[in-house]
Image: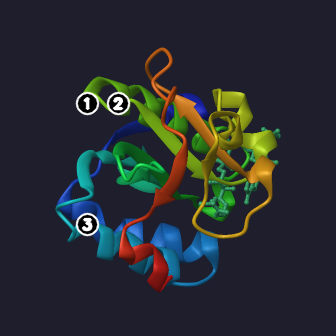
Amino acid sequence: MLTKETIIIRQETQNDYKFVFEVNNLAFKQTNEAKLVEALRTNTNVFVPQLSIVATSNNNIVGHILFTKIKIKTHENFEHESLALAPMAVLPKHQGIGIGSKLVMYGLHEAKNVGFKSVIVLGHSNYYSKFGFKPASLWNIKAPFEVPDSAFMAIELQNNSLKNCSGKVVYPNEFNEV
Ligand SMILES: CC(C)(COP(=O)(O)OP(=O)(O)OC[C@H]1O[C@@H](n2cnc3c(N)ncnc32)[C@H](O)[C@@H]1OP(=O)(O)O)[C@@H](O)C(=O)NCCC(=O)NCCS
């Protein structure tokens, strides 16, 4: 039986691409997010290979998470680099046993190791608050679109790294095409 203890989390390789496409396709029941992952991989300005991460079981891909570079643009037009957590997908038959949580925790740890200072996510506050995400409005960071306050969240990977980062998030253009 598949349990979270038998799951291995690692960086994605080129051989994984087609399986990652399928995991996103099955989890979201559409290909938009799978195509978004493909598009983001080709944008070398925002793609960080260490932060495209898969969950495997018996060498099969059962989950995927991606963090890509974004900017937080201040009112003075200064740009702070951050990361967007998106998308994240786990095969429907393996959801709810902690694979998604493992991907988030591994990803945040790796993002910190690579030197990133913060991560932004749009999602369910109950889910992401477990990992330390808080409403981005606490730092006066806004989404570039209308979104409920509690769903637009951020986490600092270094102490006070979002202090003085108030502004609007700028996503890579690939996100507009989803
Ligand atoms: C969101 C998702 C990646 C979570 O993966 P997972 O392996 O099921 O996650 P875990 O087992 O670690 O955690 C399960 C928790 O996620 C919650 N959950 C289930 N579907 C969810 C969803 N679409 N969004 C947010 N949380 C969800 C469950 O209620 C459960 O909460 P609990 O821990 O308080 O009981 C997975 O459900 C999925 O692929 N969903 C479809 C794609 C999606 O919506 N992705 C997120 C937006 S990018």
- Callout 3 environment at 10 Å: few (<14), some (14 to 19), or many (20+)? some
Q: Where residue 172 sits: x, y (%)?
A: 37, 68
Residue tagged by mark 3? 41
Look at the numbered discs 3 and 1 and tell me whether their residues touch, using CB distance below 8 Å: no
Look at the numbered discs 3 and 2 and tell me whether their residues touch, using CB distance below 8 Å: no
Residue tagged by mark 1? 114
Compare marks 3 and 2 and give the one earlier in the sequence. Answer: 3
Q: The disc labelled 2 sits on which kind of residue?
A: Glu
Picture residue at 62% right of the left edge, 35% below the top = 139
Cα–Cα gap, marks 2 and 1: 6 Å
Q: The disc labelled 1 sits on which kind of residue?
A: Val
**Foreground residue, 10 or 156?**
156
Cα–Cα gap, marks 3 and 2: 18 Å
Is label 2 or label 1 in front? 1
Question: Can residue 7 be seen at all in this image of the molecule?
Answer: yes
Looking at the image, residue 89 sits to the left or right of residue 47; the answer is: right
**Foreground residue, 162 or 49?**
162
For label 1, the SS is helix
Picture residue at 73% right of the left edge, 33% below the top = 129
Mark 1: C-beta under 8 Å from nearest atom of ligand 1: no
Q: Which quadrant would residue 15 be assigned to in this image?
A: bottom left
